[in-house]
Image: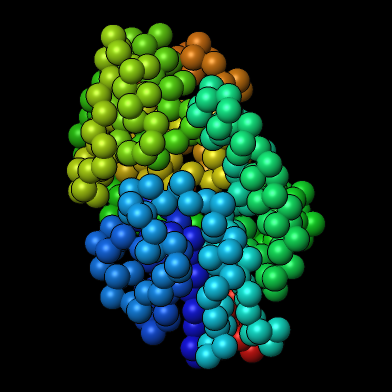
Amino acid sequence: MRLALVHDWLTGMRGGEKVLEVLCERFPTAEIFTLVHVPGSVSPTIERHTIHTSPVQRLPAVAGHYRRYLPLFPWAVERFRFDRFDFVLSVSHCCVKSIIHPASLPHVCYCLTPMRYAWDQFDAYFGPDRIGALPSRLMRPVMTRMARWDKETADRVDRYVAISHYVAGRISRYYNREAIVVYPPVDTAFFTPASRSPEPFALVVSALVPYKRVELAIDACAVAGVPLTIVGGGPERANLERHAKGTNTRFLGHVPDADLRELYRNASVVILPGEEDFGIAPLEAQACGRPVVALGRGGALETVIPGQTGLLVAEPSAEAFADAICRARDLPFDSTLIRRHAERFGRGRFGDEMQAIVAAGAGA
């Protein structure tokens, strides 16, 4: 079977790229289509596939500033052609669910989320306090058009697969389409517990973008008197470093996977301060036997068992998170039970479920 894998952009190994990596393992002859590819930014498993890029790839400074070209993305994804393929599987959180393909060609979309910034999180990305009053005013009609296009092209997908029941609800609300749920893969073979006591620090592993609410974790740890380590990069890093001035916070940027595993193993608690569509980091932490303190909304409701694998916080305030962090550090969590819960989300389970969906769709 000639399979096309379509992904929004390949600029680093985040949750969507880890999904793509497993799909590349299961479909070694598939070709990849993406808006932008920064060579060497993703795993060798992905890089060894044939990768086709869009016209956006040739624009100035695209490697570091591809998000600036967001208004061009709808036009760019419609330039791809899939006539020589038997099946298209897109992994979408922005635009690639809206590719144009022959009517006879099955298209399954593994939807990480409908576009946050075009639908319900405009202010978090493009509000006046983020980019200034005039740029925000100019961006609003752009994102309104983007949301309209996103909805109008929702039926280009034959079948939606959501990463969580929370995202399935967003797909129903914005696209008026139903979706089945297949949880994303967690590398439970790599992320494993250590037989030593944790150290007295909290950990955040996150892209540094507005909706992740990393500043809330900084404030909560300051209130709790707990040192905080932050792993990850993104456009908000400078703002967050200014916000953290005077607190016991260290920013490590991106770290190798082996170092990340050690940080998970050593942390007394891992914090998820924002409302996530799913959230891979909490499950990587649980695979290492460590408890999670998460906002009790979104995907965390499907990945954290209160009192067993962590604590859920009812409100997004520094005081509420500080209280939960202190309680989590004192509770006698069972690392074996936490680990067992994470094993339900392994890579093999994800690969098997997605392979069955492709086989069923190809045979339809």
Tell how many labels. Answer: 0
Left or right: residue 272 compared with residue 101: left
* The image quarter in which residue 266 lies: top left
Q: Could you say where residue 310 lies in the image, as x and y percent from the top left?
A: 47, 31
Above or below 138: residue 89: below
Q: Nearer the viewer, residue 290 or 225?
A: 225
Q: Residue at x 28, y 58 (%)?
A: 41
Q: Position of residue 106 (x, y in %)?
A: 64, 81
Residue pictured at 39% horizontal, 31% vertical = 236
For the residue pair 347 and 77, the one nearer the viewer reads as 77
- 117, above or below 293, in the image: below
Q: Measuring 38% from the left and 36% from the top, which residue is drawn there? A: 235
Q: Position of residue 45 (x, y in %)?
A: 30, 70
For residue 203, say whether it is visible: no
The answer to whether residue 317 is seen in the rendering is: yes
Above or below, 341 relative to 210:
below
Q: Residue at x 37, y 24 (%)?
A: 240
Q: Quadrant of residue 81 in the image?
A: bottom right
Residue 178, image quadrant: bottom right
